[in-house]
Image: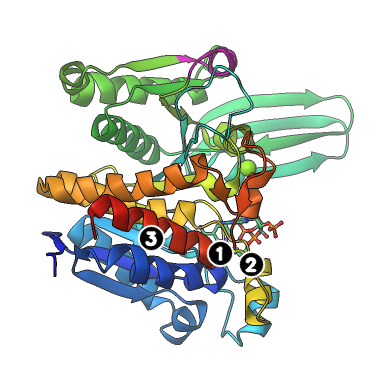
Amino acid sequence: MSMKIKVKTPIVEMDGDEMTRVIWAKIKEQLILPYVDVDLKYYDLHVSNRDKTEDRVTVEAAEAIKQYGVGVKCATITPNADRVKEYDLKKQWASPNGTIRSILDGTVFRTPIMMRNIPPAVKSWRKPITIARHAYGDVYKNVEMRIPGKGRVDLVYTDENGKEQQRETVHEFKGAGIVRGVHNLDKSIYSFARACFAYGLAEKRDVWFATKDTISKIYHGRFRDIWHEVFENEYREKFKSAGIEYFYTLIDDMVARQIKGEGGMIWSCLNYDGDVQSDMLGSGFGSLGLMKSVLVSPDGHYEYEAAHGTVTRHYYKHLKGEETSTNSIASIFAWTGALRRRGLMDDTFDVVNFAAKLEHSVVELVEHGQMTKDLVSLTTTPNPRVLNTFQFLSAIEANLREKLGR
Ligand code: NAP
Ligand code: MG
């Protein structure tokens, strides 16, 4: 009997829903627990358990990530009206990801997993581009009006004592039109900047950020200035010793550079830019099943997950006993992401090494032409061997065993 690899510090585990819950259990059983001795602080975020605990379980999981530093999360249902009926819920509980993100004050980073036989749409992309999206304010919290006809619209700031302090005319309308008010908060912009610089440093990768501050001199200008201030005061020296850079430019220049470049950087985006560009990059690099996601707090806590959802359609097929083709790669990489981070934080190289071996087992399998159905239309491998959900996991297991000599 060979010894298991010991993880020094506990990892927070959050279980989830539907098809991803099914593969989650398999990943643990086949790819993690036989080889790794880890104290998992388990939180069951199954939608029924969130309902039963009045969603306290989600809050407790987030608090545990703050305590232990690293978490790994399965995809979860964000209930809508149909789900309330389906699971007989007391109410439409908030998105667990939203709840955890606001407790950790975190930023989400999405990174594609690249394979040699799944070429990106853009020929020059050699390394993954990670997108960080600011997740507060702007158009997502806007207040808007239709203006029926002639008249003036002003922007007014009244202080907490009710005294008018500033007034700007938005427009003197000569006829009907529309108007919109958006806001953001210094505090949120500081946290966003810190999370991005902290992650760049942890990953030893350049951080790129862009706005349109030539046009929006005050609003976007504030983002530019806060980022500059945080970088100069807290990160310039650290970046220099790590051999990485912070690069700031205009959003249109940024997009042009990304399409011509080879990738590799962390691209930090304003909320709307991140919404649009993350979808562009997602399809540009391949499939949702190959997109990883990590939530990083400004003080360096990490929560790893897959970017996709619970794959509902496959779950119903699975319940009927039909064969499914769920790609487990992003969920496996959530586990390896958490283990690697834990290993780096604890200085346990064997844990980091195990994470790398598991990832190689996955990548090699696909590069040797064995994959789930979603990847078949993307691969350059002629006549790939198509595996179902469980065959794919077992093939990874066999590959991993070979690498570990077990
Ligand atoms: P989804 O679960 O991401 O699935 C949408 C479709 O994308 C699937 O039907 C499937 O296409 C394909 N797909 C996604 N992941 C795949 C994988 N790993 N392997 C193979 N195919 C994959 O999105 P959804 O159906 O819109 O949402 C389902 C539930 O997930 C919702 O309740 C939503 O609230 C939740 N959700 C959770 C998270 C999260 O926890 N982070 C994120 C998004 C959504 P085919 O059916 O064509 O095979
Ligand atoms: Mg989008």
Specify the amino acid type for callout 2: Thr
Q: Main secondary structure of the magenta part?
A: helix
Q: Position of residue 223 (x, y in %)?
A: 43, 26
Q: Nearer the viewer, residue 190 or 120?
A: 120
Q: Residues within 10 Å of mark 1 (few under 14, many from 20)?
A: many
* Residue at image point 14% right, 70% down: 1
Q: Which quadrant of the structure image shows residue 285?
A: top right
Q: Which is in the foreground here, disc 3 or disc 2?
A: 3
Counting residues from the start of the chain, the first of labels 1 and 2 encountered is 2
Check residue 397 in the rendering and tell me which mark sits there, or answer none: 3
Q: Position of residue 173 (x, y in %)?
A: 82, 26
Q: Secondary structure at mark 1?
A: helix
Q: Residues within 10 Å of mark 3 (few under 14, many from 20)?
A: some
What is the C-alpha distance between the residues marked 3 and 1? 13 Å
**Relative to 272, is 62 on the left or the right?**
left
Q: Secondary structure at mark 2?
A: loop
Q: Nearer the viewer, residue 352 or 177?
A: 352
Q: Which is in the foreground here, disc 3 or disc 1?
A: 3
Q: Position of residue 17 (x, y in %)?
A: 51, 72
Q: Residues within 10 Å of mark 2 (few under 14, many from 20)?
A: some
Counting residues from the start of the chain, the first of labels 3 and 2 encountered is 2
CB under 8 Å between discs 3 and 2: no
* Residue at image point 57% right, 35% down: 118
Residue 380 in the magenta stretch? The answer is no
**Count of numbered badges drawn on the protein:** 3
What is the C-alpha distance between the residues marked 1 and 2? 6 Å
User: Looking at the picture, does residue 352 appear above or below residue 94?
Assistant: above
Query: What range of the chain is rendered magenta?
Result: 249-262
Residue 261 in the magenta stretch? The answer is yes
CB under 8 Å between discs 1 and 2: yes
Figure quadrant, ligand 2: top right
Q: Which residue is mark 1?
A: 389
